[in-house]
Image (cartoon, rainbow, N blue to C red):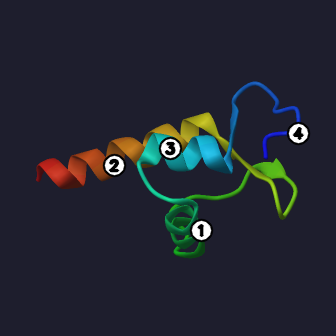
Amino acid sequence: MESQIIRPGYLTAHQTAQLLGVSLGGLRLIVHRGQLRRSGGTPRQPWYAVTDVQALDAERRQRKVA
């Protein structure tokens, strides 16, 4: 459901979930826990800032290594 035109520097929920290696339900939990914020879009089709997603991904990878 990627019918919206996404501004540069933002990812859809599907793209974000794929990058983080989680399901859409997992992504919703991450957002609910406050680990990631929506940066635009609509309530049904949120966008996430690439920089925020990359920072979260790096943090999650760091935790796996430790």
Q: Are marks 1 and 2 in contact (CB under 8 Å)?
A: no
Question: What is the crowding at mark 2: few (fewer than 14 residues within 10 Å), some, or many (at least 20)?
Answer: few
Which comes before the other along the chain, label 2 or label 4? 4
Q: CA distance from mark 3 to mark 1?
A: 13 Å
Q: CA distance from mark 3 to mark 2?
A: 16 Å
Q: CA distance from mark 1 to mark 4?
A: 19 Å
Q: Element under label 4? A: loop
Q: Are marks 2 and 4 in contact (CB under 8 Å)?
A: no
Q: Which residue is mark 2?
A: 59
Q: CA distance from mark 3 to mark 4?
A: 18 Å
Which comes before the other along the chain, label 3 or label 2? 3
Residue 12 relative to residue 30: left or right: right
Observer-side mark, 3 or 2, equals: 3
Outermost residue on the front side: it is 1
Q: Amino acid at mark 3?
A: Gln
Q: What mark, if any, has residue 4 been given in the picture?
A: 4
Which comes before the other along the chain, label 3 or label 1? 3
Which comes before the other along the chain, label 1 or label 2? 1
Q: Element under label 2? A: helix
Q: CA distance from mark 2 to mark 4?
A: 29 Å
- Relative vertical location of residue 1 with respect to residue 5 in this rendering, above or below: below
Which comes before the other along the chain, label 3 or label 4? 4
Identify the residue at image location x=82%, y=49%.
40
Observer-side mark, 1 or 2, equals: 1
The percent coordinates of residue 38 (x first, y second) are 71, 56
Question: In the rendered image, which quarter is residue 43 located in?
Answer: bottom right
The percent coordinates of residue 65 (x first, y second) are 13, 48
Q: Are marks 3 and 2 in contact (CB under 8 Å)?
A: no
Q: Which residue is mark 3?
A: 18
Q: Which residue is mark 1?
A: 28
Q: Element under label 3? A: helix
